[in-house]
Structure formats: structure tokens, C-alpha cells
């Protein structure tokens, strides 16, 4: 957001300098005045320097959004927290979905800056050896997607996500084997450490076992 305003400001400045020069192209004696190309170029350098990260951010969001929409079975919106938003945000959660006045979760989520960075790093990697933070970041996207399709109970959303982490990874470009391995790692390494309100009724035969093909506990031993 800060970058957007800086970009707009310098673009306006470049336009202003140019517009100001146009009626004064010639001096009183009819001699041409040079275009203020150094100032305008400097403004445009700042514009490009702002546009590149904005574009990268938008591209990451649209990639996450496409995958989340595929797993959700309908269009959802995904936002990655920007630097400015992260600066003023002290909440401990890694992502969230707002619930509307009618009590229905919105089909839009905000993912915190750190997991978004981990998702970006994972997307740019071979996906063969993700860090645990990257595994958790993919899962956060799946978990928030489960809220967006209407699950409000944390244990249920968590378990539904655990059963769809492999699909999410594949929707994000992983191979089926990489997706299965990622889902298994979340189940064996991260899930045992989640807070108690997230940790009920998951696993073979549990309340939230949906009986889907190849759940992460199937091969986990
Ligand atoms: Zn949740």
C-alpha cells in the first residue's frame, strides 16, 4: 500500500514536470528549451522500483488464489499481508478469514507476511525438500480455504485441511508424490504440536475423518 502511494506520487510528479515543460518549450526568443529528462527519468526509476515488488506480490496472490479456488470448488480471494500491514499487526495467528454479520465466513482470506514468504520460496523451489515452515505455510492456505467454504469449527477445519493439503500442493504445482509427502509431514511433524482447540477428532476413524482417498495418516504408520 505504501509502495502504491509512492508509485502514484512519483508518476504524478513525472507527469507534472512534463506538463509544466510543454508550454515553456521555447524561451522568449523562440529557442528550444531542453526537456527535463534527468528529473523525469529519476521519477520513472522510482516508479519502476515500486512496480516490480507490487507486481510480484500480485502474481503470488493470484497463484495462491487459483489453487485455493480449485480446492474450494469455487472462487475465493487470497491476500498476502504487505510489509506495512505486518508492521502494525501484532496478532499471533498466521492467517484468518472474517465472518460476516450473518455468521457465514467470507470467501476471502488474509495470509500473514511470513507464511506468504514461505509459500513464495516453496513455489520457487523444486518442492522436493521443503522446510517445515514451507509445509506449514501450504497448510495454512488449505486451513483458511476450509474456513472460506464454511467450516467454522477449528478442529474440523484443521482436519479437513489435513485431508486436502496434498491436493492444495498439487494445485500449486507439486507432483502428486510431493503433495503426499508434504501432507504426511504436516500430519506427523506439525499437527502433534497444534493448540488443543485445533486437535480433536482427526485421524483414521475420527469424527472428522471424511474417508477420502489417501489421507496423510494412511502411510504415516
Ligand atoms: Zn482456523
Image (cartoon, rainbow, N blue to C red):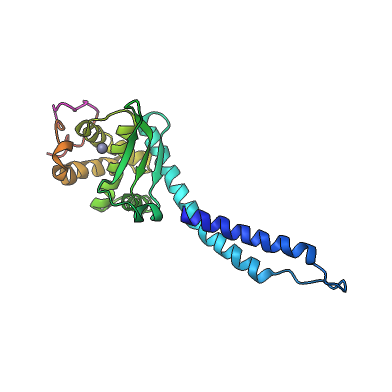
Left or right, residue 142 beside residue 197:
right
Query: Which x, y percent locates residue 187?
Result: 18, 41
User: Secondary structure of the magenta portion, mostly?
Assistant: loop
Which contiguous range is marked in magenta? 204-212
Give the total of numbered labels: 0
Q: Is residue 210 magenta?
A: yes
Quick one: quadrant of the C terminus?
top left
Residue 78: x and y in percent read 40, 41
**Which quadrant does ligand 1 occupy?**
top left
Instruction: Give the residue at x 31% y 37%.
Output: 144
Q: Is residue 111 left or right of residue 15?
A: left
Residue drawn 62% across and 61% down?
13
Position of residue 158 measured from the top left corner of the image (x, y, whole percent): 22, 36
The residue under the point 37% across, 32% down is 106
Q: Is residue 52 magenta?
A: no
The residue at 41%/29% (across/down) is 74
Whether residue 51 appears in this view of the structure is: no
Q: Is residue 170 visible?
A: yes
- Observer-nearest of 178 and 193: 193
- Viewer-closest of 166 and 14: 14
Q: Is residue 217 above or below residue 10?
A: above
Q: Looking at this rendering, what residue extends furthest in the left direction? A: 221
The image quarter in which residue 154 lies: top left
Identify whether 22 is placed above or below 130. Answer: below
Left or right, residue 15 beside residue 94: right
Amino acid at each position: 500500500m505504501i509502495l502504491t502511494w509512492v508509485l502514484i506520487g512519483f508518476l504524478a510528479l513525472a507527469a507534472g514536470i512534463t506538463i509544466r515543460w510543454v508550454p515553456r518549450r521555447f524561451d522568449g526568443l523562440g529557442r528550444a528549451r531542453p526537456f527535463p529528462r534527468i528529473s523525469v527519468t529519476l521519477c520513472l526509476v522510482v516508479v519502476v522500483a515500486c512496480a516490480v515488488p507490487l507486481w510480484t506480490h500480485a502474481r503470488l496472490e493470484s497463484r495462491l488464489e487459483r489453487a485455493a479456488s480449485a480446492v474450494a470448488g469455487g472462487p475465493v480471494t487470497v491476500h498476502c499481508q504487505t510489509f506495512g500491514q505486518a508492521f502494525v499487526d501484532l496478532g499471533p495467528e498466521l492467517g484468518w478469514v472474517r465472518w460476516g454479520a450473518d455468521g457465514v465466513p467470507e470467501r476471502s482470506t488474509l495470509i500473514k507476511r511470513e507464511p506468504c514468504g514461505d509459500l513464495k520460496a516453496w513455489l520457487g523451489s523444486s518442492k522436493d525438500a521443503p522446510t517445515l515452515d514451507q509445509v506449514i505455510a501450504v497448510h495454512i492456505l488449505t486451513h483458511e480455504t476450509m474456513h472460506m467454504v464454511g467450516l467454522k469449527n477449528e478442529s474440523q477445519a484443521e482436519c479437513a485441511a489435513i485431508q486436502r493439503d496434498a491436493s492444495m500442493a498439487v494445485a500449486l504445482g507439486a507432483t502428486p508424490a510431493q503433495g503426499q509427502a508434504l501432507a504426511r509431514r504436516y500430519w506427523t511433524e506439525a499437527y502433534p504440536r497444534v493448540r488443543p482447540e485445533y486437535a480433536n477428532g482427526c485421524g483414521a476413524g475420527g469424527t472428522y475423518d471424511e474417508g477420502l482417498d489417501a489421507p496423510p495418516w494412511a502411510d504415516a504408520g
